[in-house]
Image: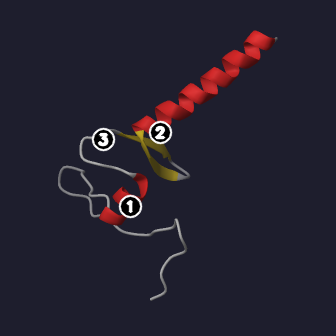
Amino acid sequence: MTPPPPGKLAGTAKVGDRGQIVIPKDMREMFGIVPGDTLLLLADVERGIAVLRNDDFVHLAETVLDARKDRDDDG
């Protein structure tokens, strides 16, 4: 089997009785997900589910809001 290109992985996860899944180890390592991390799940009925580390989302939101504030302050 050919290995995936750098930065790309594919895997599966079974959903348990309580709706829980286990993120494969190689994917946790790729994204620096460790026990105790909070993950943000975004869902779109047409596009599926995206999983983000909450810290990454907060950083993105702060960056967007800071850029908007800077733009508004210049205007």
Foreground pick, 68 / 32: 32
Distance CA(mark 2)–CA(mark 3):
11 Å
* Horizontal relation, residue 34 to residue 1: left or right: left
Image-quadrant location for residue 72: top right
Q: Secondary structure at mark 3?
A: loop
Image-quadrant location for residue 15: bottom left
Horizontal and vertical percent for residue 63?
A: 60, 29
Q: Residue at x 79, y 13 (%)?
A: 74
Which residue bears the numbered disc 1?
A: 27
Q: Secondary structure at mark 2?
A: helix
Please tell me whether residue 46 is drawn above or below residue 53 in the rendered image: below
How packed mark 1 is, by other alpha carbons closer than 10 Å (few <14, some 14-19, many 20 or more), is some
Q: Residue at x 55, y 52 (%)?
A: 47
Amino acid type, residue under disc 2 in the picture: Asp
Which residue bears the numbered disc 2?
A: 56
Which residue bears the numbered disc 3?
A: 37
Q: Residue at x 47, y 39 (%)?
A: 56
Q: Residue at x 55, y 51 (%)?
A: 46
Distance CA(mark 3)–CA(mark 1):
14 Å
